[in-house]
Image (cartoon, grey):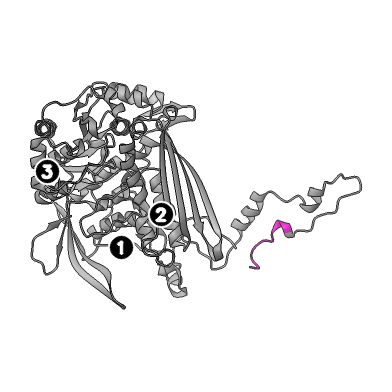
Amino acid sequence: SPNLPKSPTSQPQPAPTPNQTTSAAAIAFPKLPPLRLYISSLLSTSYNNIIMSGCKNLDGKFTVESDSCKYTDDAIISDYSYETTVVEGNTVKPITTKMQFKTERKVGKTGVMLVGIGGNNGCTCVAGAIANKLNLTWETKEGTQKSNYWGSLLMASTVKLGNDPHGNAVYTPMNNMLPLLDPNDIIWGGWDINGTNLGDAMKRAKVFEYDLQQKLYPHLKDRKPLPSIYFPDFIAANQGERADNVLTGTKQEQMDQIRKDIREFKKENELDQVIVLWSANTERFSAVEEGVNDTAENILSSIEMGEAEVSASTVFAVASILEGSTFINGSPQNTFVPGVVELARQKKVFIAGDDFKSGQTKMKSVMVDFLVSAGIKPVSIVSYNHLGNNDGKNLSAPSQFRSKEISKSNVVDDMVASNRILFEEDEHPDHVVVIKYVPYVADSKRAMDEYTSEIFMGGKNTIVMHNTCEDSLLATPLIYDLVILGELCQRVQIKKDGEGEEWESFHPVLSILSYMLKAPLVPNGAPVVNALFTQRCAIVNLMRACLGLAPDNHMTLEHRFESTLAALNGEGEPANKKMRLG
């Protein structure tokens, strides 16, 4: 453009005088004005008819003004057109389903009971919520740190709400979209096979900085886990030394005690609801056997008879379902055998799982989605981990590692199956997962990945990644998210046009929680989706539907035509944005 200043490289440079000593580098690259001066001159130049759109943030509460959204004292009711596309042979048909969403506005008083509350994730979760509620600060060698919920999708990320009249994108915190549970308000409790109080458990975990531990200890030292269920056959033998706080009696008697614990916790704290979440040791897989755990009737009978193939996590799940409490499984084992799923459907109680998706697997669900979507064929994925916390110690046993290996390995399946240009039917990348126990590194897990892909004309591309994961500091925000989103699902119902006046809740298998989980549990007949941004879009667009808003998309047609740009730029000042010039 004639209005732009010339680059400093185009300015004539004086030749060196005879008395000057000039290096070859100085001759090849003459001294230039400071880069910041050149950039400043660019930014101060008057650009004719160029207006840059940017981003704005809306932190306060908002109201949707639309015939499709109605607010009452009790609920938000929206009219929504759900548009899908059906492919029949070579015919493609757009389908529109008219429905209403009803979202209860009141968030009930909620308690969360963690199985494994004395473990690294459990005590970090409780301590982190207390730190945020008290707005604690602490000193480190980097300076003063403040409590936050960073790493939580619902507490620390934003979503695009729309555009302002000038085309600037307006973002709002995700927890501003609908009335949501605040983790500061959660009442915490739970069980652990180790009886150490949560203050000392926090010190043992070595997750938080020393100064923060000192400030949290008085708030945790009097909190002790309830006795838990310990079936040695399902976890590593090396966990026996920790098991000093365990229930006794038959499996039926132990389940009855868990149910009693839930009822008493709810009553003592005057709660509207209790959510139970498994954050305890990874168990080996349970054998699914006819007559044992294949139906709701059989699983209840098997617990009563003390069948060996009923795991502790399954007993907790059944107890929670019978008490009407949502149960979420944060470990990889097959807690939800067919009989448990059937029982949840019968009782209309939510269940969700499996296995927190926090570090290496989350990156993998992004990387493989990127490669396949870009038309690049990943042919080999090799993942190595080593960690030194108690999770790593338990996973050093082959049966428990196998549970984790299965949940980590399946994360790429849906992305690979989506592209038949790259992959033949039943063709998959070579995929290897290795986990080693190294006590010294404690909670600071190391993850190393190598992605080898085939590219254009027989070429090869290799991406190598090293990821140091503060394991519990990545997993804990997922616990908050699972609980918050699980609670929201209890307050959302739909009603389809022409199907009567009865409101319908979500299927008891809460697949909408998949973003936080490595091996998402889905209803029979539903596809498993692992692609991370697809999972996130499902959550965001569900929230938009509850407000009668169309799904977010990235067409941004208002910025792609002269007529629409002229309309947007007619008035007002645009938001600031870094300009890209070229």
Nearer mark to the viewer, of 1 and 2: 1
Instruction: Farthest residue to the right: give it.
Output: 18
Q: Earlier in the sequence, mark 3 or mark 2?
A: 2
Residue visible at 12% across and 43% down in the picture: 299
Q: Which residue is mark 2?
A: 56
State the SS at label 2.
strand
The CA span between labels 3 and 2 is 53 Å
Three-letter amino acid code at the position of disc 2: Lys
The CA span between labels 1 and 2 is 20 Å
Foreground residue among 402 and 387: 402
Magenta-tinted stretch: 1-9
Q: In x, y percent, where is residue 295?
A: 12, 49
The answer to whether 379 appears left or right of 60 in the picture is right
The CA span between labels 3 and 1 is 41 Å
Q: Which residue is mark 1?
A: 551
Q: Earlier in the sequence, mark 3 or mark 1?
A: 3
Q: Is residue 425 magenta?
A: no
Q: Are marks 3 and 2 in contact (CB under 8 Å)?
A: no
Q: In x, y percent, where is residue 70?
A: 18, 60
Question: Is 486 above or below relative to 196?
Answer: below
The answer to whether 292 appears left or right of 526 in the picture is left
Q: Is residue 58 visible?
A: no
State the SS at label 1.
loop
Q: Are marks 3 and 1 in contact (CB under 8 Å)?
A: no
Nearer mark to the viewer, of 3 and 1: 3
Instruction: Farthest residue to the bottom: give it.
Output: 91
Q: Which residue is mark 3?
A: 299
Question: Is 333 above or below relative to 7?
Answer: above
Three-letter amino acid code at the position of disc 3: Ile
Q: Residues within 10 Å of mark 2 (few under 14, many from 20)?
A: some
Residue visible at 29% across and 37% down in the picture: 282
The answer to whether 377 appears left or right of 415 in the picture is right
